[in-house]
Image: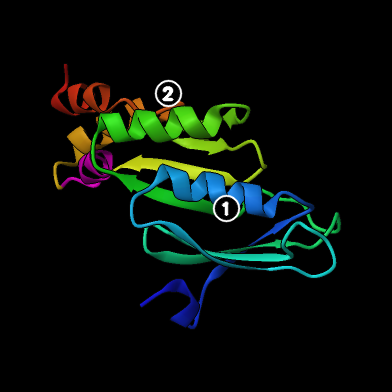
Amino acid sequence: MSGLQKKVRTCLWFEGKGREAAEFYVSLLPDSKIDQGFTAFEEEPLVVEFTLAGAPMMTLNGGPMFKHTGAASISVLTEDQAETDKLWDALTQEGEASMCGWLKDRYGISWQITPRRMVELINHADKQAATRAREAMFKMKKINIAAIEAAFKGE
C-alpha cells in the first residue's frame, strides 16, 4: 500500500524547501520514495507526499507562521553502528547534534537516531546493567553501541 492510500500521515510544515527536504530524507533510508507533489501557484510544490522507510509523510510549504521544535521528531531505529553513523553524519551535516541520539537537521527537523541494540540494553531485565548502559548513553551525542555494551557489561 503506497503512502497515498494510507489514511494517516505525518505532515512537516516548512516555510519553503519542503520538496528539497523530502528528496533528502528519501535518499537516506530504504523503502523510501517521493509519491507526488501538488503545486499551487509557484514552481515549488505546496505539498509533497512521500514514503519514509515505509511510513507515509508529507511536507507542506505553508509559510513562516510555524517553526519546528524538538517537541516532535522523526525516530529511526537503526540496526548497527554503520547505519547509525551514516544517518547521523548525513543529518548533522549543516545540522546540529544534541544529546542521546537526538539532532536537528539542516531544515530544523528533529530526529532520534536510536540503535536497536541500545534500546535492548537500556531496557534489559538486569536493572544494574541497564542503568550502566543508560548512564553511558546520557554522556553521548551520537550513540556508540560498543561503548554502551561495554558499560552494560561493567567494563
Most foreground residue, 132 or 85: 85
In the displayed structure, would residue 136 be above or below residue 7?
Answer: above
> Is 44 placed left or right of 132 in the picture?
right
Disc 1 secondary structure class? helix
Q: Is residue 145 magenta?
A: no
Where does the image place residue 61, in percent across and percent down from the top left? 75, 60
Query: Which residue does the image show at 65% across and 54% down from the upper left?
Result: 19
- Disc 2 to disc 1, C-alpha distance: 31 Å
Disc 2 secondary structure class? loop
- Give the number of the disc on residue 139: 2
Instruction: Give the position of the N terminus as an image quadrant.
Output: bottom left
Residue 70 in view in this figure: no
Instruction: Give the amino acid type for the residue marked by disc 2 in the picture.
Output: Lys
In the displayed structure, would residue 42 be above or below residue 148?
Answer: below
Magenta: main secondary structure equals helix
Q: Few, some or many C-alpha atoms within 10 Å of disc 1 (few <14, some 14-19, many ≥20)?
A: many
Q: Which residue is mark 1?
A: 22
Most foreground residue, 25 or 67: 25
Instruction: Give the amino acid type for the residue marked by disc 1 in the picture.
Output: Ala
> Is 57 placed left or right of 146 in the picture?
right
Asked if the residues shown at circle 2 and circle 1 are in contact, with their CB atoms under 8 angstroms apart, the answer is: no
In the displayed structure, would residue 90 be above or below residue 123?
Answer: above
From which residue to which does the magenta span run?
A: 116-124
> Is 81 placed left or right of 98 in the picture?
left
Query: Which residue does the image show at 72% across and 49% down from the upper left?
Result: 17
Q: Few, some or many C-alpha atoms within 10 Å of disc 2 (few <14, some 14-19, many ≥20)?
A: few
Instruction: Give the position of the C terminus as an image quadrant.
Output: top left
Query: Which residue does the image show at 45% across and 82% down from the upper left?
Result: 5
Which of pointers 2 and 1 lies earlier in the amino acid sequence? Answer: 1
Query: Which residue does the image show at 49% across and 83% down from the upper left?
Result: 7
Q: From this viewpoint, which residue is outermost toward the top? A: 155
> Is 49 placed left or right of 6 in the picture?
right
